[in-house]
Amino acid sequence: MNSHEIDYKIIGDDIQLVEIELDPYETVIAEAGAMLYMEEGIEFETKLGDGSTPNQGFMGKLLSAGSRALSGESIFMTHFTNNGMTKRKVAFSAPYPGKIIPIDLGVSQGRIIVQKDGFLCAAKGTKISMHFNRKLGAGLVGGEGFILQKLEGDGKAFIHAGGTVIEKQLNNETLRIDTGCIVAYEPQIDFNVETSGSLKSMVFGGEGLFLATLSGTGKVWLQSMPIRKLIQRISPVGANAKKGSSFILGNFFED
């Protein structure tokens, strides 16, 4: 199924929303609860499936919904359709501060791999499914886990990230990254993990025990402030624990 061709505008700087302009009878699909406002003439319906396979039976829709639950998303998706005779707008906001990234799936070989809670909305016709990380090490300690999301289609999709977004083009290169800072990458990129260094560096360096590695040729999208890191910074318990451990044990590894 070909995706609907939607027009859009991203509004805001640090806490963004995306405004989608729908022609008559065009549809955009979105995460449940993501809608901010919609104009008269737009109607919405909550469904189990993403609408990419219209003839899919109930069991197929149920399996699709179950796979979305495993990837950390709601089992339902909301379909917003312009049933009026003129162009109408509907807007969606991300669940936490950051940026919204527009991606043309037709340019990214028809699919991208996204962190499990990164999807916001997309043109109808976009297929949203699980993506299993086949590498045991990356699945166990890579921050993103075994299960990611895969977006497939030929239209526009929108994902959200925390903080500032960095888009990088790798050309047969390897990039080492904090495990929680990966937002999305093209499917030809290889994702793995490695230890962050010596024992001293891993325990007291503040970078965690492992780093993610993205290798190959293609685009990757990174976020400067993943939501888990933000929570750790503003949590009094987490902040005090970190300071206390550094103060008490820091001299143990003195050079």
Image (cartoon, grey):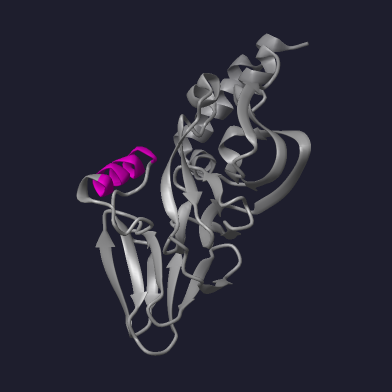
Q: Is residue 92 magenta?
A: no
Whole-percent x and y of residue 44?
29, 71
Q: Quadrant of residue 55?
A: bottom left
Of residue 82 and residue 10, the one placed in the foreground of this image is 82
Indicate the quadrant containing the N terminus: top left, top right, bottom left or bottom right. bottom left
The magenta segment: 60-71
Q: Is residue 209 above or below residue 4?
A: above
Q: Which residue is at the front of the view, 118 or 226?
A: 118
**Which corner quadrant holds the C terminus?**
top right
* Residue 205 point in image, percent of width and height: 67, 24
- As drawn, the residue found furthest toward the left would be 58
User: Can you say whether 151 is above or below 84 in the image?
Assistant: above
Residue drawn at 39 percent across, 63 percent down: 29
Q: Is residue 200 left or right of residue 66?
A: right
State left or right for residue 255 relative to residue 250.
Answer: right
Residue 132 x/y as whole percent: 46, 32
- Secondary structure that dominates the magenta span: helix
In the rendered structure, the answer to whether residue 52 lies left or right of residue 98 reads: left
Nearer to me, 185 or 200 = 185
- Residue 125: x and y, percent? 43, 61
Q: To which quarter of the image does residue 198 belong?
A: top right
90 to 103, vertically: above or below: below
How many labels sit on residues?
A: 0
Which residue occupies 56% across, 52% down? 110
